[in-house]
Amino acid sequence: MNGKISITLGGELRHLWFNNYSRGEVKNLYGIDPSEIGKAFFEKAQANPFRAFEDLLWMGFIGYYYGSRQEMPYSKQQIAEWVAEADNDELVRVWNLWTEWSGVRELLSANEKKSPS
């Protein structure tokens, strides 16, 4: 899986790429090993899912721009503004890609199987 996606934010098509640069950014955002992102992300998402989406987009932009050897053109403030007005379907597309790319989807499936119905 290549972890690439293009979505419309702020009225323009933007590109994200979840890759090793994105994985490395986990340490900067959460202060944890990238392998522990699932739990930390879900805790943040429970408090406010849109703040968690800001982090996902940030990681995807870092991956895209650093992986392309370009300077990151967006600020966290811009990303927050885009998330505030984003189409939920676009955010769900990012979520689906990220959970598959990061392996979090496997953790979710394992937890669902353990949970009594």
Image (spheres, rainbow, N blue to C red):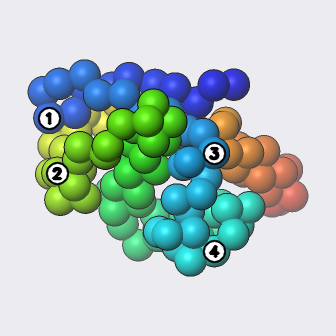
Residue at 73% of width from left, 45% of height from top?
103
Up the image or down, 29 lies above or below 84; here it is: below
User: For mark 1, what is the residue?
Assistant: 10
Whether residues under marks 2 and 1 lie with C-beta atoms below 8 angstroms apart, the answer is yes
Up the image or down, 60 lies above or below 31; here it is: above
How far is the residue under mark 4 from the one under mark 2? 25 Å
Compared across the picture, whether 98 is left or right of 39 comes to: left
Whether residues under marks 4 and 1 lie with C-beta atoms below 8 angstroms apart, the answer is no
Looking at the image, which is closer to me, 53 or 64? 64
- Marks 4 and 2, the one that precedes in the sequence: 4
**Other residues around mark 4 within 10 Å, as few (<14) / some (14–19) / many (≥20):** some
Q: Which amino acid, mark 1?
A: Gly
How far is the residue under mark 3 from the one under mark 1? 26 Å
Looking at the image, which is closer to me, 21 or 39? 21
Q: Which amino acid, mark 4?
A: Ile
Q: Which amino acid, mark 2?
A: Gln
In the drawing, what numbered circle is on residue 32? Answer: 4
Whether residues under marks 3 and 4 lie with C-beta atoms below 8 angstroms apart, the answer is no
Image quarter (top left, top right, bottom left or bottom right) of the N terminus? top right
